[in-house]
Image: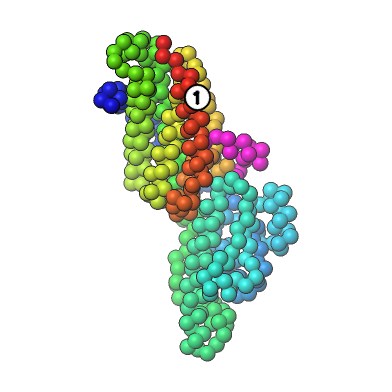
Amino acid sequence: MKKVITICLFEIKRTFKKKSAYVIMLGMPLLFTFLFGTLFGSDAEVSFQIALVDEEQTAVSQHIVQRLMLDEMISYNIVSGHEAKEALANHEVQGIVMLEKGIAEKLRNGEPAVRFQHPPGMSTAPLVKQQVNQVLYSIDVYATAATVGSGYLNEDWETVYGKLSKNEGQIQVWTEQRTSGSAGNPMMGVSYSSAGFSIMFVMMMMLTMTGALIEARQAGIWSRLFTTPVTRYQVLFGYFLSFFIVGWIQFFLLIVLSTVLFGVNWGSPGGLLLLITTLLLCVVGLGMAIASLVKTAEQQNAIGTLVIISTCMLGGVYWPISLVPDIMQKIANFVPQTWAMEAFTTLIAESGNVGDILLPIAVLFGFAIVFLSVGLSRMKYA
């Protein structure tokens, strides 16, 4: 184990001695986060088209509709159930928010009152769910007040609720939250970009680091190293451990800096720990796989950069994957960035926990096994 630690520490020290490493590790991801986050999260007029179906047509459901329509980033089109299904099938809308019959009773009983239907892989789904949940939370305040008030006033629940909702402006029971425009909250755009470009530049950093495997082989370092009492597995594990530790240091610093500079809330610490650990296994495995398939460091840099940038675009790092055609969304399921972004958006936008990201974690772990198997089995030592 001492030999593994020696190799690991040597590579870590060698990495942090390079000034260019800090540019890739911190400078570039923070710059891209600022540019893309403010561009798409603050000044841009980005609108998601969602069909809104009100089957109840009561004071409660109409109150929910009014609240949903306040949002400037999500554009709701009020249609019938049949029209909503046709619009979704024709890709005219990105999802359907359904206010089903009996919504008032469901609210009183604490049951799910709204159904959200959307295509699989819709990365903006957490944003819509978050907005709907915020509206339902505010409506629940009125529902609770109406329940109490109906007992004191000897009036039916719907009548009391109607009075409360009409006087909403005077009661001021909630703070209006907007998600776009200069008067809105741009943090959703910055949070999305922060997660995406953290993934991308961690991958770029790991590509640079795994190039050390090729350099060591070309320089004959491994040939001389294997003349000493050290095994191939100890050497590879030492390198692997150094890549993994540097990746974690980079991710940790990006989380801290994005929180301080941009106010990003990364969500559940436990979910974040599991996600980043699994993602790094996948990313390090990809870097080692590429290093094992090429002959020179120049080839690895060229091929690796092309693979990383193209799959990041495909996987929703630059923009929500729901904005691309269906065929591209299906292809995107075969790149790890898609699943990483799905997990990050669940943690950040939906306040999810470990249980909510188990599927993306499992898929990323599958990618890691494949990449590491290729890298370790095809690695050349001389």
Viewer-side residue, 100 vs 228:
228
Please tell me whether residue 155 is drawn above or below residue 230 in the rendered image.
below
Task: Name the residue nearer the viewer: 240 or 308.
Answer: 240
* Predominant secondary structure, magenta span: helix
Q: Quadrant of the C terminus?
A: top left
Q: Position of residue 49 (x, y in %)?
A: 62, 53
Q: Say whether residue 145 is left or right of residue 269.
A: right
Q: Residue at x 73, y 54 (%)?
A: 86
227 to the left or right of 89: left
Residue 171 falls in image quadrant: bottom left
Magenta stretch: includes residue 373: no
- Residue 29 coordinates in the image, percent (x, y): 41, 35
Q: Residue furthest bottom?
A: 154
Residue under label 1: 374
* Element type where label 1 sits in the image: helix
Q: Amino acid at mark 1?
A: Val
Q: Is residue 194 visible?
A: no
Q: Report the span colored magenta.
A: 322-337
Q: 75 or 83: nearer the eye?
A: 83
Examine the rendered structure and indicate whether residue 181 appears above or below residue 138. above
Numbered disc total: 1
Q: Residue 293 versus residue 208: which sits nearer the camera?
A: 293
Residue 253 at what x, y percent from top left?
33, 39
Q: How is the image coloured?
A: rainbow
Q: Residue visible at 71% across and 63% down?
A: 80
